[in-house]
Image (tube, rainbow, N blue to C red):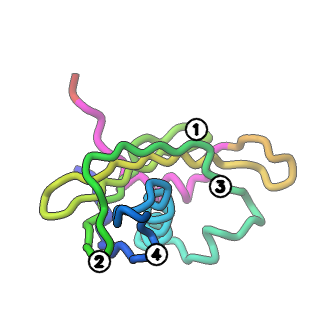
Amino acid sequence: MSLKFKTQIRIKFREADPAQIMYFANVFSLAHDTFEEFIVAAGYKYREWFSPNEHLIPIRHVEADYKAPFVPGQTYDVTATVEHMGSTSFKMKYLFEQNGRLHATVHMVHAVLDPKTKDKMPLPEIMKQRLSPYLEAPANV
């Protein structure tokens, strides 16, 4: 059984469009805000993760699937897991829910790059150790 990181977010008025629904692209910022909390829960110091000395960890792919609107002033539960861990990248999954109703699922793929060459490099062992408790169990087929 894998761990799940959980937090809550509140949609601010400035994040909404004229229809008073959260602007669609803001879900990516909310997912990344959750990621910043997640890495601390996984055992990293904030500065340690974002230090570009040993490796870079840019996001190389994002996608979102919306099921229900987000409304300003409302609070939503966010669950973050590591959906997949490859040799040079890992994929995060974020579920945004309110009262058990799914509002959106966000996927973000992070690559690990050499800071000098910008070439892909293997996930560091410490990263594997810290992220693996949150790795989703493979689905039984």
Amino acid marked by disc 3 = Ile
How packed is label 4: few (under 14 Cα within 10 Å), some, or many (20 or more)?
few
Residue 72, picture quadrant: bottom left
Q: Toward the viewer: 62 or 138?
A: 62
The answer to whether 141 appears left or right of 64 in the picture is left
**Could you give the CA–CA distance between mark 3 and mark 2, rounded to whole angstroms?**
32 Å
Which marked residue is nearer to the observer: mark 3 or mark 4? 4
Amino acid at the residue labelled 4: Arg
- Judged from this view, the residue extending furthest toward the top is 141
Q: Reading the chain from its start, which is encountered first: label 1 or label 2?
A: 2
Which residue is labeled 4 in the image? 14
Q: Nearer the viewer, mark 1 or mark 2?
A: 2
Residue highlighted by disc 2: 73
Q: Contact, CB < 8 Å: mark 3 with mark 2? A: no
Q: CA distance from mark 4 to mark 2?
A: 10 Å
Query: At 70% from the left edge and 70% from the top edge, which residue is drawn?
Result: 51
